[in-house]
Image: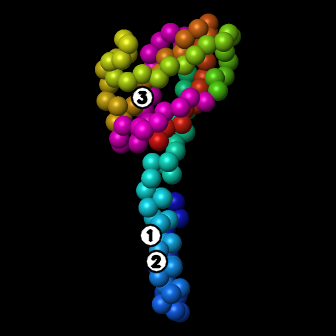
């Protein structure tokens, strides 16, 4: 992210507007939506749980899968919480868990996390 420059404008009104904009931009840069990170591509064997490190240092507010590559059939990639529906127990601040189902082959897929 670009750091905001600290300058002083000529008039008090212009300076007030500059400070207001600088504060608003700074707040927007701190929001999770400003920090979307793409992880992958990840190789996923059919019907196998895979832990994927995300590097956020916190539990993601969103994990979304991109389009799968190399699919031999229509399938679905499911995202699991720790211990959910047979998924392994893991630290969600460090990784997320995915499982490719019904593709009939190994696929690669990237994920967006924030």
Please say which color scheme the image uses: rainbow
Q: Pointer 2 and pointer 1: residues touching (CB < 8 Å)?
A: yes
Above or below residue 85? Residue 19 is: below
How far apart in space, not on screen, are marks 2 and 3 (Cα)? Answer: 39 Å
Q: Is residue 44 visible?
A: no
Tell me the residue that label 3 is attached to.
Answer: 96
Above or below residue 43? Residue 105 is: above
Tell me the residue that label 1 is attached to.
Answer: 23
Within 10 Å of disc 1 (Cα), the crowding (few <14, some 14-19, many 20+) is: few
Mark 1 secondary-structure assignment: helix
Camera-side residue: 29 or 3? 29
Residue 62 on image: x %, y % = 47, 36
Above or below residue 114? Residue 106 is: above
Residue 25 on image: x %, y % = 50, 65
For image coordinates 55% across by 26% down, the residue present is 42
Camera-side residue: 59 or 94? 59
Residue 99 on image: x %, y % = 49, 17
């Amino acid at each position: 992210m670009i750091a905001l420059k600290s300058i002083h404008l000529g008039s008090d009104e212009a300076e007030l507007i500059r400070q207001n904009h600088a504060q608003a931009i700074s707040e927007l840069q701190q929001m999770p939506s400003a920090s979307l990170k793409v992880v992958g591509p990840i190789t996923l064997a059919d019907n196998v749980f895979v832990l994927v490190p995300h590097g956020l240092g916190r539990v993601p507010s969103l994990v979304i899968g991109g389009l799968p590559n190399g699919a031999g059939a229509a399938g679905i990639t499911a995202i699991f919480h720790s211990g959910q529906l047979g998924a392994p127990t893991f630290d969600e601040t460090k990784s997320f868990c995915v499982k490719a189902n019904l593709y009939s082959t190994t696929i690669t897929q990237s994920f967006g996390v924030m």
